Image: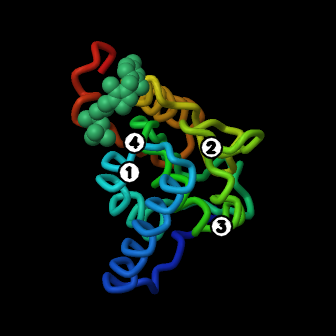
Amino acid sequence: MQIRPANPLLDVRDLELKSIQYRKTLLSMIKRANSGHTAGSLSCVDILNVLYNRVLRVDPQNPTDPDRDRYIHSKGHSVEALYTVLADRGFFPVEELDTFEQYGTRLIGHPTRNAPGVEQNTGALGHGLSLAVGTALAAKKDGRAYRVFTILGDGELTEGSV
Ligand SMILES: Cc1ncc(C[n+]2csc(CCOP(=O)(O)OP(=O)(O)O)c2C)c(N)n1
């Protein structure tokens, strides 16, 4: 498999600095759009930072590699954090974050696969876990070694489907 983790040379201090920048970026997006989920994005941005910059084997230049790890953003309302990290990883230009929630944008208020790097459409609370389990089962059936990650909100955990 060609895919490598983002940058194994990033140390904890580098990641801390990225988290500060990510927080500024996502707050700016929400302020500019006058719309968004501030708390939910701030609560998961550190996890996404470590996932995308240290853990996930994904390649922005080859986003459909069948062996890539999958991340499914079950708490889809916290989309600003996801877009911020995906842009920083190079899945799409950072400048595109300015189009968040604007008419015609790929970066609408919940994740869709129109946005490069987004694996699944999410936002209906509780559905992402099922998608993640199904994706993991597919890996087993296909004999592939990719890993599947998801994040759910605490309130989301009370959804019946979870
Ligand atoms: C099925 C469904 N019901 C309601 C909503 C509206 N909604 C979006 S976010 C949210 C609260 C989520 O709380 P939590 O899971 O604790 O997320 P966190 O605050 O940790 O980000 C609700 C009710 C939704 N997106 N989907």
Corner quadrant of residue 46: bottom left
Kindly state the secondary structure of the residue where label 4 is placed: strand
Corner quadrant of residue 133: top left
**Pointer 2: what residue?**
101
Q: CA distance from mark 1 to mark 2?
A: 15 Å
At label 1, the amino acid type is Ser
Kindly state the secondary structure of the residue where label 1 is placed: helix
> At which x and y percent is residue 82?
50, 52
**Pointer 3: what residue?**
94
Q: Is residue 150 left or right of residue 84?
A: left
Residue at image position (60%, 45%) is: 118
**Pointer 4: what residue?**
150
At label 3, the amino acid type is Val
- Pick whichever of labels 2 and 4 is earlier in the sequence: 2
Q: CA distance from mark 3 to mark 1?
A: 17 Å
Looking at the picture, does residue 52 appear above or below residue 117?
Answer: below
Q: Nearer the viewer, residue 135 or 104?
A: 104
**Pointer 1: what residue?**
41
Corner quadrant of residue 45: bottom left
